[in-house]
Image: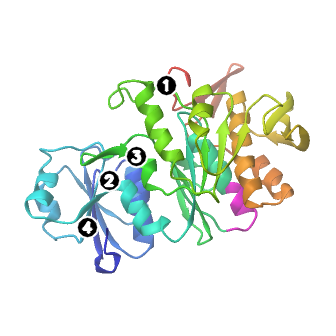
Amino acid sequence: MLWLDRIHRIHFIGICGAGMASLAAMLKERGYEVSGSDEGIYPPMSDFLAQSQIRVTQGYDLANLKHEPDLVVVGNALSRRNPEIEYILNYRLPYTSLPEALDSFFLRDKMPIVVAGTHGKTTTTSMIALVLDHAGMKPNFFIGGIAENFQSSYGLGGGQHFIVEGDEYDSAFFDKGPKFLHYHPYFAVIGNIEFDHADIYPNLDAIRLQFARFVNLIPERGFLAVGADCPTALDVSRKCFCHRETFGLDPANDWGARNIGIEGERLCFDVLYQRKLYRRLRLAAYGRFNIRNALAAVAILHRIGVPEDDIREGLESFRGVRRRFQFRAEVAGIRIYEDFAHHPTAV
């Protein structure tokens, strides 16, 4: 447990990770004195931290902790033998992981919407946050990328909901469980489950177990949207205690799609809810995976009670996420896109 009233100065070890930098900026915005250290300090995170007026030191050194911070946030890429980690252990400085800090400082008094799955987390999280913002619901959000509509990876709107990308990767050297188990999901998405992160999970069954634990955290009054195109996700979700709805390209799902096509520069399709026409969407994005992402977002937003017009208008204004199938240039009639994809299925 973190005694928040006793915390004023916070130091981040490994501050230049996308999530760590975002959390550091959020805490700075809340009025905390924030510092950090890292070995690899370069754009875009170095620029982002400089804009947030956060002091960052190159390299790990005992001197970085001489100001005796009230709390140290440890990045999950770091391990024992790091001099700053050895210092906090030897001198008993309070320390925590990124997901635990996010929960303690930001999620406890909000209604978390946690977007999980092997693929599509960042885009779906961004879509939900954008529509809630468009609807005037002042969302808080934490995304693993820069959402173009916000020009940021986080937002502290002050509203009731906090949308967070739920990563299944481990939390810290002292907490090998996945990050999303810290986020207390009330509304949740599981888009798909595939074998990934072979450095910490030996097989698909090990990943299934973590998602099963995640599902078990959703309360009875909560809600789960699950990708029906993935048998593993469907199987894991069957043991939930909350209301569950499926989404996917098949019109037979609770949320399905039909009449898919390209009209002008937009990906267009009918959204069906329980086989009846809900709305036709015209996305400024491409790929059937983005249809699935949009359907997941619509399922959550509908459950929250966002009006249909706001859902349509918000999604149709979505401009994407940096490095997620991002258009970069057109040369001799050939379009060039940049994408973060590294998993074989995503590639």
Q: CA distance from mark 3 to mark 1?
A: 24 Å
Instruction: Label 1: state its secondary structure.
Output: loop
Stretch in magenta: 130-137
Point out the residue furthest to the left here: 90
Residue 251 figure quarter: top right
* Among the two numbered marks 3 and 2 on one chain, the one whose residue lies closer to the N terminus: 2
Q: Nearer the viewer, mark 3 or mark 2?
A: 2
The x and y percentages for residue 8 are 30, 76
* Among the two numbered marks 3 and 1 on one chain, the one whose residue lies closer to the N terminus: 3
Instruction: Label 4: state its secondary structure.
Output: strand
The x and y percentages for residue 236 are 56, 35
Q: Which residue is mark 4?
A: 71
Instruction: Label 3: state its secondary structure.
Output: loop
Is mark 3 in CB contact (under 8 Å) with mark 2?
no
Q: Which residue is mark 3?
A: 43
Q: Which residue is mark 1?
A: 343
**Residue 275 is covered by the magenta coloring:** no
The residue drawn where x is 54% and y is 31% is 193
Q: Which residue is mark 2?
A: 15
Relative to 97, residue 190 above or below: above
Q: CA distance from mark 4 to mark 3?
A: 26 Å
Q: Nearer the viewer, mark 2 or mark 1?
A: 1
Q: Nearer the viewer, mark 4 or mark 3?
A: 4
Nearer the observer, 146 or 86: 86
Point out the residue furthest to the bottom here: 5
The residue drawn where x is 69% and y is 62% is 133
> Looking at the picture, which amino acid does disc 1 mark?
His
The residue drawn where x is 69% and y is 43% is 296
> Looking at the picture, which amino acid does disc 3 mark?
Pro
> Looking at the picture, which amino acid does disc 2 mark?
Ile
Q: CA distance from mark 4 to mark 1?
A: 35 Å
Point out the residue furthest to the right here: 277
